[in-house]
Image (cartoon, grey):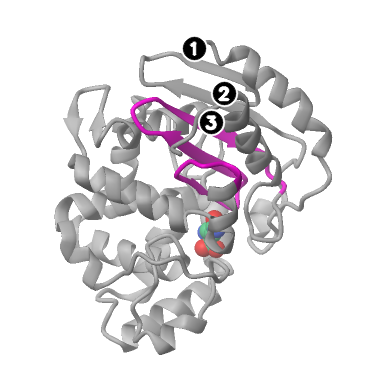
Amino acid sequence: MDYKDVINQIYNEVKPMWGQGKVADYIPALAMTDPRQFGIAVQTLDGEMFTVGDAETKFSIQSISKVFTFAMVLRHLGDKIWTSVGREPSGNPFNSLVQLEHEQGIPRNPFINAGALVVTDRLIDLYPRPKEAILDFVRRLTGNDDIYFDHTIARSEREHADRNMALAYFMKSFGNIHNDVETIIDVYCSQCAISMSCVDLARAFRFLANEGVNPLDNEAILTPSQAKRLGAVMLTCGFYDESGDFAFRVGMPGKSGVGGGVVAYIPRNLVIATWSPELNPHGNSLMGIETLERFTTDIQNSIF
Ligand code: GLN
């Protein structure tokens, strides 16, 4: 199928929504992003790529990195990871502290900040050089070695990480964090500050649409069952307290980040990545979600 016309049309229809959302400013370096940017990339598993707008511009992937670190840990720990992090939607904002006390320091899922911090903690247990390992993993998935951390954004987040540090210390008090909190926050802020484009992200998510296998070198990153489960967690938890609405409107598993990126996919078919920095009140890209809703509507295909 030729997706070029579909995404061109959506791009033109959605573009007038500029100005309706708000760029994330709780990380000061992110607040400097020019809000008027918008890109879409569709990668089919047949190997075709379709793009429109700022699809090649690199941006801060932020919480989309949680999918990569979770996949890295899942492939080593397998089902054991589920004793430290759950797989239920939280119904709360991404950086919320409230459930942790009732649930003895076990975060609801790996895609809220608390869950991602536990995952990064396990990643530090597993890899002697965790930051290099993350970059390596993402480069291998995309086939692009030109992927780096944006150190300005990482530093800016580290300087404003009180809430994430509070989450990590609180979980440590329950024994669900093993490593030094400063180290975890350092790795976490770096992973969030990876710069990638829509094209990179659409390539990087192919293994999830492809039953766990990276089509670039046929390496099994995850088993088909792990890929299926990771998709289920993305569908139910990938958009924080907007996950139900995203499933309702879009009908694909996916993940967003406060940098304005959203990646979603239809298993065995395609990956779509969008980027527009203005966010809605849940911290998800306003135009990104609108784009994805129109996409599955127009192509009359989703996971349902
Ligand atoms: N680095 C951000 C944070 O921890 C990521 C949040 C997000 O993208 N939702 O606050």
Q: Secondary structure at mark 2?
A: helix
The residue labelled by disc 1 is: 1
**Is the CB of the residue bearing disc 3 within 8 angstroms of ligand 1?**
no
**Is the CB of the residue bearing disc 2 within 8 angstroms of ligand 1?**
no
| Callout 1 touching callout 3 (CB < 8 Å) | no
Gap in angstroms between the C-alphas marked 1 and 2: 9 Å
Which mark, residue 299?
2
Residue 229 visible to the viewer: yes
Q: Position of residue 57 (x, y in %)?
A: 60, 29
> Which label's residue is closer to the chain start, 2 or 3?
3
Residue 106, relative to residue 65: is it above or below?
A: below
Q: Secondary structure at mark 1?
A: loop
| Callout 2 touching callout 3 (CB < 8 Å) | no
Residue 156, relative to residue 168: is it above or below?
A: above
- The image quadrant of residue 289 is top right
Residue 151, relative to residue 77: is it above or below?
A: above
Q: Position of residue 180 (x, y in %)?
A: 31, 75
Count of labels in the image: 3
State the extent of the magenta-drawn residues as a range.
Answer: 249-278
